[in-house]
Image (cartoon, grey):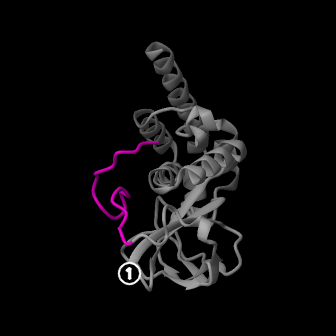
Amino acid sequence: MVVAASRQSKEYITLASVIAEEFTQTAVERDIKGGTPTEQLHRLRESGLLKLLVPQEYGGFGSDWVTALQVVREIAKGDGSLAQLIGYHYVNLANTGLLGRPEQIAKYYTETARNNWLWGDSVNPRDPNLTLTPDGENFRLNGTKNFSTGARSGDIVVIAAIREDLGKILFAPLPKNREGIVFNDDWDYIGQRQTDSGSVEFHNVLVYRDEVLGNPDSTAHPNCVCQFLPGNCTRSI
């Protein structure tokens, strides 16, 4: 079993190396141009590498973090922007597995494997000014995040916002086409111009209660999300 897993890991890393070689042919030209690397993201979707860490019972490859990080390093040899996008994708999906309820984990893992979803985010804590306000059974999201890797090019945007009445951070994966989400084309950093890391505005965006990861009414703060707090994780993807 260990031998088989090792062989598969080598195959994924080799595949990433092949893809990186393809990306490097146009990486400089594309970085100068900026924008979304649409064709390259399509190639990543086709490769299956987006579901690398999804457990096999949900339709993924069930690989490990050592392999995933080696995949990111291989892709980085050809294109730093694409490496950043897939690296953030792995982290965002993993955080869903760490914080989500069992039914949420099953839903998002299954859909990611089935549709080769790319996960972006809008959670960076350098400007933690997103707010969630209760609206009946659901919530309304408002504010702006100035650094949001993969948000515009991803299928899912993970948000982190303060629930105003409880003063706690809540996380929720939202579909990128949700009404009220505005993606701004204001990212222009050399070597990373195709990471779609620009600002995102949220204007009274509806967030359904069952989209909030974990228990939205708990007063406990998440303790295993790498963007905010150190370790103590007992669950793994």
Q: Residue at x 61, y 46 (%)?
A: 106
* Secondary structure beneath label 1: loop
The residue that disc 1 covers is 167
Q: Position of residue 46 (x, y in %)?
A: 70, 39
On screen, 143 above or below 106? below
Is the residue marked by circle 1 packed among few (<14), some (14-19), or many (20+) residues within 10 Å?
A: few
Residue 36, picture quadrant: bottom right
**Does the stretch in magenta take in 230?**
yes
Q: 24 and 87: which one is in front?
A: 87
Q: Position of residue 199 (x, y in %)?
A: 53, 76
Give, as a three-letter code, the residue at label 1: Gly
The segment highlighted magenta reads 219-237
Q: 100 and 9: which one is in front?
A: 100
Q: From the viewer's perspective, is 103 left or right of 10?
A: right
Q: Residue at x 61, y 77 (%)?
A: 138
Q: 197 and 203: which one is in front?
A: 203
Residue 226, picture quadrant: bottom left
Q: Residue at x 39, y 75 (%)?
A: 168
Count of marks overlaid on the render:
1
Q: Position of residue 29 (x, y in %)?
A: 59, 55
Main secondary structure along the magenta-highlighted residues: loop
Q: Position of residue 79 (x, y in %)?
A: 52, 48
Q: From the viewer's perspective, is 228 left or right of 90?
A: left
Is residue 70 at least partly visible in the picture? yes
On screen, 38 above or below 221? above
Q: From the viewer's perspective, is 227 left or right of 107?
A: left
Is residue 34 at least partly visible in the picture? no
Q: Residue at x 46, y 20 (%)?
A: 6
On screen, 39 above or below 32? above
**Does the stretch in magenta take in 88?**
no
On screen, 207 above or below 143? above
